[in-house]
Image (cartoon, grey):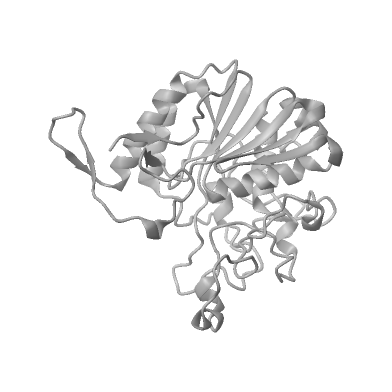
Amino acid sequence: MVQRFWIDSVHATPPKSTVVGKLRGLTVSRGTVTGERLWRAVTCSQANGCFDNNSYPLYKESDCPYMSDQLACHKHGRSDLGYQYWRWQPHNCNLKRWNATEMWEKLRDKRLMFVGDSLNRGQWISMVCLLQSVIPADKRSMSPNAALTSFKAEEYNATVEFLWAPLLVESNSDDPVNHRLDDRISVQILWSAEANGACEELDGLGAMELAMGAWADWASKVNPLKKRVFFVTMSREWKPESEGNCYSETSPIDLEGYWGSGSDLPTMHMVEKVLSKLSSKVSVLNITQLSEYRKDGHPSIYRKFWEALKPEQLSNPASYSDCIHWCLPGLPDVWNEFLFHFL
C-alpha cells in the first residue's frame, strides 16, 4: 500500500502562495510570540488572562454568514459569552492589532491555505469571519467542493482556502473525504527502507518522526521568496486529571505555569529537532500551551450534532460534550492574530 504524507504541502500550488497547516498529535516548544505567561496583561485582574469587552470579540457570531453550526455556540444555546472576550498579551511585546483591510493587502494576488483536520477548518472559518466584513457581498464568493473550499475576494484577487487532509499519514486507498475513525482498524506501524527488506516496528513517536522527516524533505525544497510555510502546533482535548471535562466550564484555568496534557515533552523535542533543520523555511505558530488554559472555550454541548443523541447521552451532558473544537468567536481568532502578526 503506497503512502503519501499530508501535513502542510499542497500539490500544484502556484508562486506567491502561503500555506498554513497544523500537524495532528504534535506539540513544540519553539516559537517566537508565545511569551512566558499566557492570557495575562499588566492591566488585567485575572492571573492568566485579560478580559476585554471593549475591543473583543473581533466579530459577532451572527454577522458571519460562513459560520459553522459546529462552532456557533451562542446560536445553539450557550448563554455565557465570556469566552468571546479574552485576548492574549505576551510579555515584553505586543501582538499587532487585527486589521482586516491590512490583512487583505498582505494577501493581494495570493492564496492563503489552511491544511488539515476539523481543528484547522475551525481556524479557517475564523479567518474567513475575520476578513469577510470588509468585502461587499457581491465581491466575495465561497466555492466548496469535496476536499477544497475557497473563499475569494475579487477586489484583492486573493483566496483563503481550506484543504481537508486530516491524517498525519494517508494512503492512496483512503477515501478523499471520509476519514471517520470507526471505518478504520488498528494496525501496527511497520517501516522498511527497501522493497524486499525486513520491516521495523515503530511506536507512535517513531512513526510521527518518520512522517515529520518526509514533510521536512518537502519543506526544505520550498522557495521562501515564493511561498511561506507556517507550522501550527496542536491544541488538545481538555481533560482534567480528575473526572470531568469541559462541560459547564465558563472561565480559563487560573493557574500560573499550568502545563496541560498536550504539552508532551518527548514529542515536543522530536518536533523541535526536525524543525531546527529547516532554518528560515518554516515559521512556527506555537499555540499549544496557551490553548490549554482555555477550558472555557470549547463547544461542549452547545453545537449541532450530526447524529441523534441517545437517551443515555441526553441524561448525562458531559458524556457527549465536545472538548476538542473551539467556539467562534473565540480562541482560533487569537491563533489568526498570531498569523497576522507574523505576516
Q: Is residue 269 left or right of residue 143?
A: left
Q: Is residue 47 left or right of residue 157?
A: left
Q: Is residue 135 left or right of residue 244?
A: right
Q: Position of residue 217 (x, y in %)?
A: 39, 24
Above or below, 317 relative to 101: below
Q: Is residue 37 visible?
A: no
Residue at image position (57%, 61%) is: 255
Q: Position of residue 324 (x, y in %)?
A: 53, 59
Above or below, 238 relative to 9: below
Above or below, 60 relative to 142: below
Q: How many marks?
A: 0
Q: Position of residue 73 (x, y in %)?
A: 69, 64
Q: Position of residue 247 (x, y in %)?
A: 58, 72
Q: Is residue 321 visible?
A: yes
Residue at image position (49%, 47%) is: 177
Residue at image position (67%, 60%) is: 69
Residue 15 versus residue 265: which sits nearer the camera?
A: 15
To which quarter of the image does residue 148 belong? top right
Q: Quadrant of the C terminus?
A: top right
Residue 42 versus residue 323: which sits nearer the camera?
A: 323
Q: Is residue 155 left or right of residue 83?
A: right
Q: Quadrant of the N terminus?
A: top left
